[in-house]
């Protein structure tokens, strides 16, 4: 081999290191403000540790789901723009929960009148969802007379069974998941159902519904908050005549402070973890899924829902639900006519893309991680199991201040990364960065921000940033230079590396 050529190739190999990409994608603001040329002292930074070899759990199939009351209405289910936006958010991986009191009343959402279900309208509303590949969960909130018609368990059971027959027998739609009732527990409504009364309602209705279609799953009771006392007692009274548990949480009325809203969210996540522990004790070796079937930063319309404040809250619930040991969260609500939606007519609010990225890149295995101050920075790393071989990690700054971050990764380092950002200045922004940029000098997260990082390279290595391919290339050049038993040396070198 020509010595000059060899030396040139050797210098190129040694000098090759991944460099930070400058600027951002077209039409997106730069996030260069997150980097500083001056290093911060270690004790000023929040340390984020991730051991990529330590798997916590498999992320459930329907982890990041949504409610869509609009799909009670055939005109929405057959609207190409709305259905495209729904698919964008769910990637057809998550549940689409159909709930709304309008289902029972005088409303465009109504599916029944005086206890008689509208078979044709139901088919027109559901068929496009099923044909598009969405997994639907239908909530029947109360009896045919509305919100207060929940105390006659026999009449309610027949009402539910009649709908199962129309959906799965008459129209062969194959809807598997059914939830009953909705927020009818004592302590929230009057008179409300006691634990024993709720157990009777659920058991009676479930038996009637499964007599029509034994393949379905029936759960509930969709309590208004994560009630860690009521639910375990209900499971004791009802199990095994329940296929999943469902609960709700909201973080106030939209007028409380942002920190208080986030504290309420964190308390709900802690309660989910407690609920998981208590339910596991009751069911033993049998696993009973827990679904958070409604959540939002406000239980009524509020401007914060569509802002970065809402994005931080949503990300807290998306990640916290899974870290708690629960199995799915379902955002309330994406109906374009709702003042609580991230879809505004045909306009897609920036926060809708949060669900898109989670469903695209945060399925697979949840990895063990730690934040040195989880009251400020929340971390959520995922080893993706799709064909792209992606890894992804979320860094959520739930504090009102910028936070300097010190990333400490073991057993895997990325090279190139896509950085998705929601903060005060970015309703939704994507830019390209890399590990070198995140590790040089100071790396900070802006106040009240969601930062999702997705690796672009399947072959990122545990030694980081393309070091493994460069090492092989150097061995190859050295072997060629000495020209002695080339194949033997290559084989030996590979054995040493592997």
Image (spheres, rainbow, N blue to C red):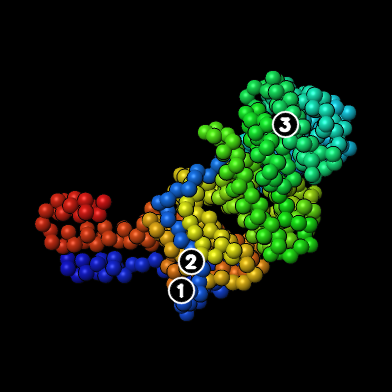
Q: Which residue is mark 3?
A: 199
Callout 3 touching callout 2 (CB < 8 Å): no
Q: Describe residue 325's horizontal placement relative to residue 308 as left or right.
A: left
Q: Which residue is mark 1?
A: 42
* Residue 364 position within the rendered picture, expressed as x and y whole percent measured from the top left: 49, 45
Q: Which residue is mark 2?
A: 47
- Decide which of 191, 402 is in the foreground and name it: 191
Name the secondary structure under disc 2.
strand
| Number of callouts | 3
What distance separates the C-alpha of mark 1 from that of mark 2?
A: 8 Å
* Residue 177 position within the rendered picture, expressed as x and y whole percent measured from the top left: 66, 32
Q: Is residue 33 above or below residue 197?
A: below
Callout 1 touching callout 2 (CB < 8 Å): yes
* Residue 270 position within the rendered picture, expressed as x and y whole percent measured from the top left: 62, 52
Q: Is residue 138 above or below residue 336?
A: above
* Residue 456 position within the rendered picture, expressed as x and y whole percent measured from the top left: 46, 55
Q: Is residue 401 above or below residue 432?
A: below
Quarter placement of the N terminus: bottom left
Which mark sits nearer the N-terminus, 1 or 2?
1
Q: Residue furthest top?
A: 211
């Amino acid at each position: 081999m020509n010595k000059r050529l060899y030396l040139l190739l050797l210098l190129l190999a040694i000098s090759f290191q991944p460099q930070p990409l400058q600027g951002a994608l077209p039409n997106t603001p730069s996030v260069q403000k997150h980097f500083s040329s001056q290093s911060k002292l270690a004790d000023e930074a929040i340390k984020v540790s991730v051991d990529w070899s330590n798997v916590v759990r498999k992320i459930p199939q329907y982890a990041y789901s949504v409610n869509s009351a609009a799909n009670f209405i055939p005109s929405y289910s057959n609207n190409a723009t709305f259905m495209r936006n729904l698919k964008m958010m769910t990637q057809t991986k998550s549940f689409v929960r159909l709930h709304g009191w309008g289902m029972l009343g005088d409303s465009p959402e109504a599916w029944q009148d005086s206890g008689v279900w509208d078979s044709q309208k139901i088919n027109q509303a559901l068929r496009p969802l099923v044909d598009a590949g969405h997994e639907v969960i239908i909530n029947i909130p109360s009896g045919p007379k509305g919100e207060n018609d929940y105390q006659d368990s026999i009449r309610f059971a027949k009402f539910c069974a009649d709908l199962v027959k129309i959906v799965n027998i008459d129209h062969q739609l194959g809807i598997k998941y059914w939830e009953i009732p909705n927020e009818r527990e004592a302590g929230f409504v009057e008179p409300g159902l006691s634990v024993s009364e709720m157990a009777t309602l659920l058991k009676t209705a479930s038996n009637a519904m499964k007599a029509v279609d034994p393949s379905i799953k029936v759960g509930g009771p969709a309590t208004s908050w994560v009630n860690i006392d009521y639910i375990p007692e209900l499971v004791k009274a009802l199990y095994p005549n329940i296929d999943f548990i469902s609960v709700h949480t909201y973080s106030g009325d939209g007028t409380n402070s942002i920190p208080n809203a986030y504290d309420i969210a964190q308390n709900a996540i802690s309660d989910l973890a407690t609920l998981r522990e208590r339910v596991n004790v009751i069911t033993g070796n049998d696993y009973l899924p827990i679904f958070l079937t409604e959540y939002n930063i406000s239980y009524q319309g509020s401007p914060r829902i569509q802002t970065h404040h809402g994005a931080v809250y949503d990300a807290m619930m998306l990640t916290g639900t899974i870290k708690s040991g629960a199995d799915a969260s379902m955002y309330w609500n994406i109906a374009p006519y709702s003042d609580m939606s991230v879809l505004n007519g045909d306009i897609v609010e920036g926060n809708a893309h949060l669900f898109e990225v989670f469903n695209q890149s945060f399925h697979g295995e949840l990895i063990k991680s730690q934040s040195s101050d989880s009251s400020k920075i929340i971390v959520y790393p995922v080893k993706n199991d799709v064909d792209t071989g992606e890894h992804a990690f979320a860094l959520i700054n739930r504090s009102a201040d910028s936070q300097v971050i010190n990333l400490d990764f073991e057993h895997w380092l990325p090279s190139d990364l896509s950085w998705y950002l929601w903060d005060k200045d970015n309703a939704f922004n994507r830019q390209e960065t890399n590990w070198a940029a995140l590790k040089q000098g100071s790396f900070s997260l802006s106040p009240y921000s969601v930062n999702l990082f997705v690796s672009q390279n399947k072959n990122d290595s545990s030694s980081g940033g393309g070091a493994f391919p460069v090492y092989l290339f150097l061995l190859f050049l050295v072997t060629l230079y000495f020209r002695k038993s080339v194949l033997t040396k290559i084989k030996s070198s590979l054995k040493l590396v592997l």
